[in-house]
Image (tube, helix red, strand yellow):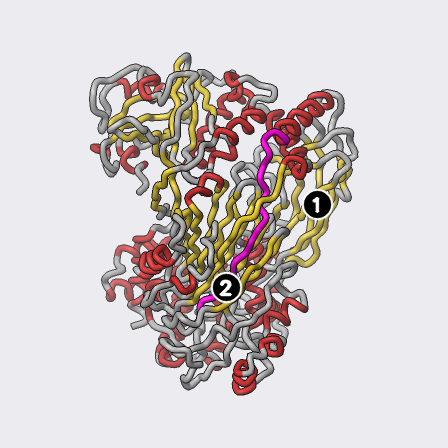
Amino acid sequence: MDQSVAIQETLEEEENCSICDIIHDNSTESRLLGLVESANEKALFVYTHRRMAITADDVSLEDVLPISLDFSVVEVSSPEQLFVVGTDTRVRITYKHKEMELKLPFGSHSRLFLSEVNKAWSDVCRSPMQELKFDWISKYQKAPKGVKGAPTPLGTNLTKYSLHQEGEKPSDKKGTLEKDKTNNSDSDNSIRSSIQESQSFSSRENRNDLVRSSSHTAENKAQILAMPQFGLRDNLIKCELLKSEDVYTFLENFSFFLGTYNVNGQTPKESLRPWLSCTLHPPDIYCVGFQELDLSKEAFFFTDTPKEPEWTRAVSEGLHPDAKYALVKLIRLVGIMLIFYVKTEHAEFISDLEAETVGTGIMGRMGNKGAVAIRFRFHNSDICVVNSHLAAHVEEYERRNQDFKDICSRLQFRQLDLTQPPLTIMKHDVVLWIGDLNYRISDLDVDGVKELISKKDFETLHSYDQLKKQIDEEAVFVGFEEGDINFQPTYKYDTGSDNWDSSEKCRVPAWCDRVLWKGKNIKQQHYQSHMALKTSDHKPVSSLFIIGIKRINDEAYKKTFEDIVRNIDKMENECIPSVTLSKREFDFKDIKFMEHQAQTLRLFNDGQVPCQFEFIQKPNELTYCKPWLTANPPKGFIAKGGSADIELEVFVNRGTAPDLNCGREQIEDILVLHLERGKDYFISVTGNYLQSCYGTSIYALCHLREPIRDMPQDALRELAAMSGTENTATTEKPLDIPKELWMMVDHLFRNAVKQEDIFQQPGLRSEFAEIRDCLDTGIPDSLPGSNHSVAEALLLFLDALPEPVVPFSVYQQCLECSSNESQCQRVISTLLPQCHRNVFNYLAAFLRELLKSSEINRLDVSILVTIFASLLLKSDTKQDLVEKRKTQEFFRHFLT
């Protein structure tokens, strides 16, 4: 639970708080550390509480530490140790001449909290002449609401809760392991469990102390961290250490068990031991993936599911009995779940742990298809494990290819250093990919497939496998390997048996469930299915890998480090960095809505020293570039004589399309490339945007009888200015609804009323591009693409409207009357402008027609309400869960 709510109740209206727990080993009271801001000044508030802090009555203010020039904060945990499983983050806070050392709990929340504190303190250090009054804090020396006990002067209790005396080394008694469950929300749904640590971190602490103290004493580290030079020097050391990694590392083999199981929404009915304990010796690490954990409609929309603890318990009970394991991480996206276990003796060597999800369902929002992934550092190797469930149906192999590419591009992990760009899947030493990839056997009928299976001629059968064909064509999984398949297809069986599908559809057997890998020093020991398990219509698959993991030789590391520092000291003040740019002007032609374009800027380090570059903000601008432009990476490091490629990417989405359509914005920007300790370079980015119905208002489109691509931008700008009014822009009667909307709905009404999984299965991106161009140009006369692609194009159209179908001005009124059907009907009957009312009624009528064929298209009211309510009724601020439910309740009245 977010306990900042309780702290916020103790503050005044103009004061705002972010919060983080403080762990105290030897105290009956727990403490909360809050970062409070008011009048552009910030302070740390320290509270005590004896129970979960829910209201102001549960907390008591103990101290206030203004973030001024008298304040400093230093992290005394090493960067490597920061996210070692079982290790808290230790920080030393100094105010005036007193200091305390605190423990913050393991996890990304603590990291984000520390980042905000450091940012606040750095802002103060950059403006030492700025006068900070902190008048707003003085009242807390009295007795404000929610504060108990006698008031004390600021900073009085600072030493009261130090964990140890200066010079003593605190001991870490327990470690914290993390478990995440991801639904479609920003809330932290993590739970934590503790395990006893079996080894100390002394060697890692000592190694890191070399980096930290190479040129600065412990007392002045905090001040140095605020200086730009520290980042450059630190990166120089990191870069040189990375280049010399072979000198101070050695390989040690560890066993990794990978398992994947599509459980078809079932509950565990049998022991998982035959699957998870099939190896003679207990594996060092388990990564177990599930798909279709829960097939209920409730789970489809990102809600909790009782199936998660049931299957987690079954996995825990099924692990190899000859070892003890710790649950390191669990992450779930609807029915896709990944569980990560490690032998307890290895837990302390897991660090940099992150987990992310990406949905590839309709509009990329629905999590019925997609992936979950966990990345971590084991000793000195970076490992990423992905569990994915790709698009179904034999003919949809292109959609599966697209899902794979979307997962690779969209799934990104935050780095320890929050200023660094996120890590993608492929930027790891080892990538292990499991899941129901759903590639089928094609060009062979069911009888032919079964005959080859009966002969155990899996080699011939594999030649008909879609995944093999796509890999051979380098359409997906480029650089990945898969072991020989010597087991029969894992799909589809009659549940509870080993019999092939006997239903009316009589699915062709297929190897849907796969395990692939990418990286060096990886040997597959086995790759097999497990016929003994009969709970699902799939059979589980397992693979055991022996992976050479890089470990550090401390003596070699120390010597290498010292050599690097000496060389850097020698050259640091001798030369100024310099780079050559491949070009300074970039022009992007014919940019279209949601169509990615990229050009490469190459930087060559022609100076005598390594250099650090970064794109920086221009005066009076909040970001380094316009929102439609991205430089990837935005900052980096180039060794002497080396080069770096930067992708300048242009992508127009629903946020940027409206202003570009009407000409309020143009594709024009200047990027400022800054070299640390060097000069700035200016890069021009220009282009032309092809205006689109996507991102254009309903009002404007109703006044356009010609394709939007043929309209002058001045006319569109005038129409945009009049949107939301009943004024008529021309003497010609406007259309009742936009012709583009009519084309899509009419196409679906004529062709897709009985389409299975309509509005639930995504279309192809290439077909969306064709549909968009047809709507924008009027060519051809009828819409191309599959029904699923047209359905997704319709949803994207509604999502991109600058003013939703139900205007922002009416949104609050809709929430207030959501439970009263007659009042809801009255709101829509008086909706203005008239064109918005027409569109709402037109869409509602179409959806009611779809529901008449629900037995065939598998739609129901809950699915349509969930999808369309979020598009038709939007808030101009962030919606909370209560508001989302009310919008669904409102729209439900028009479908039943």
The answer to which of 806 and 458 lies nearer the viewer is: 458
**What amino acid type is highlighted by mark number 1?**
Asp
Determine if residue 748 is in view: yes
Instruction: Using residue 750 as the reference point, say whether residue 17 is left or right of it.
Output: left
Indicate the position of residue 635 as horizontal and vertical percent values.
63, 38
Q: Magenta stretch?
A: 540-556
Q: Is residue 432 above or below residue 538?
A: above
Indicate the position of residue 199 as horizontal and vertical percent values.
44, 35
Q: Nearer the viewer, mark 2 or mark 1?
A: 1
The stretch drawn in magenta includes residue 284: no
Q: Is residue 477 above or below residue 537?
A: above
Q: Quadrant of residue 163?
A: top left
Instruction: Using residue 286 as the reference point, say whether residue 854 is left or right of it.
Output: left
3D distance between C-alphas at marks 2 and 1: 35 Å
Residue at position x 48%, y 34% in the image: 81
The stretch drawn in magenta includes residue 547: yes
